[in-house]
Image: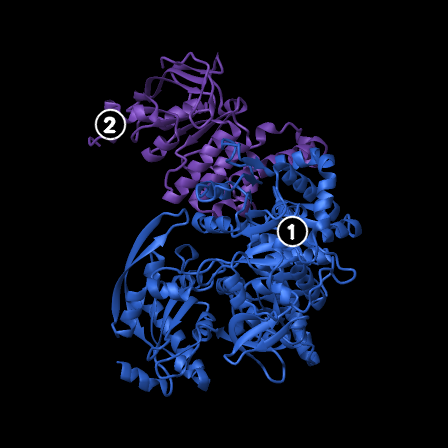
Chain colours: A blue, B purple
Amino acid sequence: MNAGKRSPAQGGLALVQTDAPKGVPQSVPALLTRNARQLGSKPAYREKEFGIWQSWSWSEVAEEIDAIANGLLALGVNRGDHVAVIGRNRPALYWSMVAAQKVGAVPVPLYQDAVAEEMAYVLEHCFARFVICGDQEQVDKVIEVQDRVPQIEHIIYQDPRGLRKYDHSKLHSLATIQAEGRAARERFERELAGREAELDFDSTCVMLYTSGTTGKPKGVVLSNRNIIMTAKASSEFDRLDPHDEVLAYLPMAWVGDFIFSIGQAYWTGFCVNCPESAETLLTDLREIGPTYYFAPPRVFETLLTSVMIRMEDAGALKRRMFHHFLNHAKVIGPRLLDGKTVGAMDKLKYQLGNLLVIGPLKNTLGMSRIRVGYTAGEAIGPEIFDFYRALGINLKQLYGQTEASVFITQQPDHEVRPDTVGVPSPGVEIRIAESGEVFYRSPGTFVEYYKNPESTASTKDAEGWVATGDAGFIEEGSGHLRIIDRAKDVGKMADGRLFAPKYVENKLKFFPNILEAVVFGNSRDFCTAFINIDLTAVGNWAERNNIAYGSYQELAGHPRVMDMIQSHVEEVNRSVAVDDMLSGCQVHRFLILHKELDADDGELTRTRKVRRRIIEEKFADLLEALYAGKSEQYTETEVTYEDGRKGKITATLELRDAATVGDADTTRVAAE
Amino acid sequence: MLDSMDQGHTTPDGRTIGGVVMEMRNITLRFGGVVAIKDISFDIREGEIRAIIGPNGAGKSSMLNVMSGFYNPQDGEVIYRGHKRPPMRPYQVARQGIARTFQNIALFDGMSVLDNIMTGRLNHMKASVLDQALWWGRAQREEVANRQKAEEIIDFLEIQNIRKTPVGRLPYGLKKRVELARALVAEPQILLLDEPMAGMNVEEKEDMSRFILDVNSQMGTTIALIEHDMGVVMDISDRVVVLDYGRKIGDGTPDEVKNNQDVIDAYLGVSH
C-alpha cells in the first residue's frame, strides 16, 4: 500500500518492522490463499437461505472473493480507496470486504441501523467512492444522502428485491459485478496479483468507526499487523481450531465482529455462520450450535429473562424440577468449570440435573456445544453470569475496545469471576495512571484516527501507550483488572465524595425489571436516577398480577411498578452503602422515564451505551424537578421513528424518594 | 373505457401495463329477490393494480366471488383472456391462474405456516395418490420443487421466523400475510385480494401495501383488490372501480375517482 497510509505516529515506535513473524501471512487476503490451499474443502461460510443452510468451502470462498475483486477492478477501484460496506451479516458482504483488501482498497463497514444522517457523516469523512449495500433499505439511505457525498461513484447491492426499477447508471447488483469479474479474470490477473503482493503487515486492513459516546464518530485505522497478531494471540489463548463454529450476528461495523468473523476465522480457518434474518436468530443459533460464542451482556440478560418468564408459565412439576436442579447447579456448575473438587454425590446430582433439566435447556438455547463463550462491552450482572456458568457454559469476560483490536484483558479458563475482566491478553501491557485511568500497549494498538491527528496524539502517546478512558485497578493477588467506570464520568459530589455513576447503574440494571438506568450526582449534594423499565419482564409481571396497561408509558407510570422499582433502588442503596468509598452514590430520588432510551433519538450509542450528557440536556426539566424535591413533573419529549419522522410525546411523571442507608441520610435531610 | 382497445402503456414508475386480461360484462347477481350486483361492467389489464371500492353492502365481495368462480352470475359474462368463461367451479378458476385471499382469513389453524403455504401448490401437484403415499419418484421431486417455491415466497414476504409456527398462534396481521403467501405460491396470473388490510394498524398496512406493490412489480402479477381504506387504495392502485348498492358509480384513475361527484356523494359524502 502507498506510504501515505502508514501512520506518522508509528515512526517513533521501537518495533518498526514491516514483515510478519515467520510463518505468519502478511495480510488477510494472504490468509485466504493459505486457507484455500490447506483447508480447501472445509466449510468456511454458511448462510441459511430459503430454509436451508447453504455452505461455501474455503476454496469456493477464494473463488467468490476473486470474482468480486476483479469486478471491483473493472469498476475502477484504486489503491487506497475506501469501500463502504453496509448490511446485515451475510457471507457476500464479508467477501466484499476481503475483496476490497485484495485490490488494495480499505473496507469500511457501517452500522446497518444507522440513520441516513449518521451514514452521510461517515461516507463523507472517509470519502468513499464505492458503497456495497445489503439491500434496498441501505441503497435508499445512500441515495437519500447522495447530495452530501457526491464522490460516490458506484453503489453495489446484494439483494435485488425492490431495486429493479431504480436507475442503474450508478447502481449494480453484486451478482453482475461478480459475473463481470469472472469474465475479466484473465485481463486483470497480473494487476490483481500485483496489488495483493503490495499488501504488507503495516498496510491498512480495515477502518472502523467508533460509535462515539461523545461527539462525532472517529475512524479507527487498523493494520494487518493489528488484526492478524491479535487474532493469532487470542486464538491461541483459547485454543480455537478449524472445527470451531461461530454465529455472525453482531453488527459488521463493530470491531468484535471483524476480529471474530474475519480475523480469527481467517487465522484459524473456522466456519462463520450467518443467520437467515434477525428474527430467526434464536432458531438459527439452535441449529448451528456454535462452539465459540460472543454476546454482549444484554443478550444473555434477555435470554435469561425469557427463560424465567417461560418457567413461570410452566406446569408445577416442571417448575419445581427446574428450580431444584438449577439451585444445585448454581453451586456445583461453576466449581466444576473452575476445575475444583466436587463431592461424588453432588456430582451425581448435577449429572441427573443435566439429564433432566440443564441439558435440554442448553439445547433449547442453542448453547449445548459452546466451548468458549465471551461477554464484554458492559458489566454483566453476577446472577446472570452465575446462571450460565451453572449450566456448565464456559462464559468468560473480556475487556477491550476498537483501538486495541478488541483484546486488552480476558479471563483465562478456571479463573472466571463476574467482577473482574481478567488478565492482560497475550502481548498486551497494562499500566494504571495516577488518575486511576487504565493504559495499554499491544501489537493490536490502532495505527491512527483517520484524518484526525489531534485525537490520535491525545489518545496514543509516542511510546504507543493508549488511554482507555476507563478508571480501574489491578487486583492484588489475582492480577485481574477491575474496571470501576468511565474515567471522565468518575467525579466528585459536592461534599467531595467519589461519584461513580456506572457502578450504581450496573447494580440497578442487574434487576431484570430495569432495562437501563442513568445516575446523576456529579458536583451535586446527592444522587438521583432515571430508570427505564424492561417491557418484557415488567409486562409479564403485570399480566400475572392483573395489572392492565395500554402502552409502555402507562405501564411505566403505574404506581405498583413505581413501588417495585423503589424497592429495587433501595436494595441497591443498601449494597452501595457497604463500600465506604462509594457510599455517597446512593440514589436519593428517582423517576421512571416515559420512553425507552433509544439510539435513534441519540440517547444511546449504536452499541447501546448511555450518552449521559445528551440525556442530561434532553431531560433537563426532569432532572431539575428531581433536585427541587417536586413530586411530579410534566414533560414533552421529541422522538424519532424508525423511518426518520419525528413526533412528540408528553407525560406527567411521578418523582419519588428512596430510602438510603447510613451517613448519606444527613445529606438528604439537608437537601430537603 | 375509451382507450380499452389499446395494447398497453408504461406507468411513470416503469411498470408495463398490458391489454385487457379479464373483462366483466353486464354482470348481474341476485340472491332470491336481493340484487347484489346490477349490470356492472369493467375490465382488468395485464400487470395493473385494480381496486374495487364502495361502502358496506355495495357488492364488492360478491363481485370478487364472481371473479373467483364462487358465484355464477344470473346475467352477464366473464371474458378471460379473450374467451367467454362458462360457469365454473372455484377450483377450475384457480387452475386458470386466478388465486385469492379471503376477508375473514381461511387458513388451517392447526397447521404450520409452511404447510399452509404448501397447500397453495395443490394445482402444481401431478403425482398419483400411490406415489404420494409412498413418497416416491414424482411425488418426491414435486415436493422438493414445491418446497423451493414456498421458500422463495417465505423469503419474499419476510416470514422466515414463523415458518414452523402453527397459524393459530399468529397475530392477525401475520395471518393475512400467510394468506397472501399461500395465494402467491400458486404462481397466479391474477391475484384477487379481499380486504387485505382490514383490521390492521398503520404499520401493518404500510407493510402490506409494500408487499402488494412488490408482488406487482417484481412478479408482474395482475392484482384486483377490494379495500375499505381509501388512503391505501388511492396510493397503490392504478385504476379504481366504485360500487354503491350494486351499481357502478365511478371508474378511472384514483384522481378521477376522487373528483367524481357521484363517488363523493355516495362514498365520501355525509349521507352515511
- At which x and y percent is residue A316? 51, 66
Determine which residue is flagged by label 1: A2
Q: Vertical placement of B13 versus A438: above or below?
A: above
Which amino acid type corresponds to the residue marked 1 in the rendered image? Asn
Q: Is residue A1 rendered to the left or right of residue A499?
A: right
Q: Inspect the image, locate mark 2, and give the three-letter code of the amino acid beneath it.
A: Ile
Q: How far apart are labels 2 and 1 at the CA level?
A: 70 Å
Element marked by disc 1:
loop
Location of residue A413 in the rendering, given as x and y in whole percent from the top left corner: 67, 72
Q: Quadrant of the C terminus of chain A?
A: bottom left
x, y (%) of residue B53? 33, 28
The dot on residue B264 is 2
Label 2 chain ID: B
User: Which residue is located at x 50 percent, y 61 percent?
Assistant: A306
How packed is label 1: few (under 14 Cα within 10 Å), some, or many (20 or more)? few
Task: For marks 2 and 1, give the one nearer the viewer.
Answer: 1
Determine if residue B105 is in view.
no
| Nearer to the camera, A400 or A645 | A400
Residue A244's tag is none
Whether A375 is drawn above or below B113: the answer is below
Q: Indicate left or right for A244 with A601 as reference.
A: right
Q: Residue furthest left?
A: B271
Q: Is residue A544 visible?
A: yes
